[in-house]
């Protein structure tokens, strides 16, 4: 039986490989950001946008302690990470 971590590792490795194998040309970061800025500006300029109520709930994210006392856990994580590449 495979674990959730093994499933995730396999999925991530497949995603990375699919990206590497993608024949389409890369899009420079500046171009992507420019396109997104245009989309955001267009959305904010929509008629009636001021009447839309949007009050998302506030979220507090607290740091959680991590226990690295087991060398086995760290070695396994590193092995899985480098297996992707």
Image (cartoon, grey):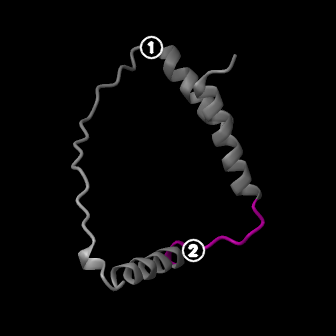
Residue 18 at x, y = what percent?
Answer: 73, 52
User: Which of the two residues, 7 or 26, is positioned nearer the viewer here?
Assistant: 7
Question: Which image quarter holds the N terminus?
Answer: top right
Q: Residue at x 22, y 42 (%)?
A: 60
Q: CA distance from mark 1 to mark 2?
A: 41 Å
Q: Which residues are magenta?
A: 22-30
> Dot 1, how many residues are within 10 Å of its Cα: few (below 14), some (14-19), or many (20+)?
few
Query: Nearer the observer, disc 1 or disc 2?
Result: 2
Q: Is residue 75 left or right of residue 63?
A: right
In terms of secondary structure, what is the magenta stretch mainly? loop
Count of numbered tags: 2
Q: Please rate how many residues cluster around mark 2, counting C-alpha atoms within 10 Å: few if below 14, some from 14 to 19, many from 20.
A: few
Disc 2 designates what residue? 28
What's the residue at 39%, 79% (across, down)? 43
Residue 14: image location, x then y, percent = 71, 44
The quadrant holding residue 6 is top right
Residue 80: in sight, yes or no?
yes
Considering depth in this image, is 69 or 41 the residue closer to the camera? 41
Q: Which mark is residue 70?
A: 1
**Frontmost residue, 75 versus 34:** 34
Q: Earlier in the sequence, mark 1 or mark 2?
A: 2
Q: Is residue 33 above or below residue 75?
A: below
**Residue 50 image point, x, y percent:** 24, 78
**Apparent side of residue 10 relative to residue 51 in the rendered image (left or right):** right
Could you tell me which residue is drawn at 65 percent across and 30 percent down?
Answer: 7
């Amino acid at each position: 039986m495979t674990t959730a971590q093994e499933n995730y590792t396999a999925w991530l490795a497949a995603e990375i490989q699919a990206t590497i194998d993608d024949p389409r040309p890369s899009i420079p970061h500046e171009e992507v950001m420019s396109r997104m800025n245009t989309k955001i500006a267009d959305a904010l300029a929509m008629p009636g946008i001021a009447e839309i109520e949007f009050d998302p709930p506030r979220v507090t994210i607290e740091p959680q302690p991590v226990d690295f006392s087991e060398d086995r856990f760290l070695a396994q994580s590193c092995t899985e990470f480098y297996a992707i590449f």
